[in-house]
Amino acid sequence: MTVDTVGRFERALEGLEVGFERVPAADASERIATIVEEPAVGAPLPFEGVTLPESVTTEPTSADLEAARTGVTPAGFAIAEYGTVAVESTADGAEAISLYSDRHVAVVAESDVVPDLSAGFDRLADGFAAGQDSVVFATGRSATADMGDLVHGVHGPGDVDVIVVEDR
């Protein structure tokens, strides 16, 4: 991973109308708190010193998922070439958290931004070898043109923000 890879990721997200911020781990919790619109659900974040706001429900029920305006999830990795985040399937349901709310906030480590699809497949192979069985690839906001004009947010989040944590 190089600084250019993260820059490429940022440019891809910009083209997808996805918010992007690169923040030091020490500032990530505060930044997440300012983006979250309540009610909110989330999955625990695996970054040392980075926490979700207390108002974020981390063991959501179906009703919590349905009511949530924001869902916050860690991304196992991101693919710079396409502006894609990989939300790994977890026992606490991170993939559902990323799909149900109006806004998805994905949090990924800078070192987990890979340059291209080939590197993404390498990460998938490593994960599957370690017992991971499912990943949701999310590229931009939910969009459909099934019935005519392009509409955002019908089948998932209409707004997406990605926070890249500079250090662990």
Image: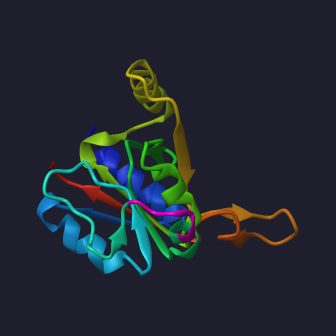
Q: Residue 116 in the image: x percent, y percent?
A: 45, 36
Colouring mode (rainbow / by chain / secondary structure / one colour): rainbow
Residue in view at x 19 percent, y 53 percent: 166
User: Which residue range is magenta in the image?
Assistant: 59-63
Q: Residue 111 in the image: x percent, y percent?
A: 25, 41
Towards the viewer: 152 or 94: 94
**Where 8 sits versus 154, above or below?**
above
112 part of magenta stretch: no
For the image, the number of numbered tags is: 0
Principal secondary structure, stretch drawn in magenta: loop
Towards the viewer: 39 or 110: 39
Which quarter of the figure is the N terminus placed in? top left
Q: Do we see residue 44 in this rendering?
A: yes
- For residue 53, what is the image quadrant? bottom left
**Where 20 sits versus 137, above or below?**
below
Q: Do we see residue 19 in this rendering?
A: no
Q: In the orientation shown, which residue stands out farthest toward the top?
A: 129
Towards the viewer: 62 or 25: 62
Residue in view at x 28 percent, y 75 percent: 33
Q: Residue 9 in the image: x percent, y percent?
A: 40, 51
Q: Residue 159 in the image: x percent, y percent?
A: 53, 71
Q: In this view, does 66 lie to the left or right of 21?
A: right
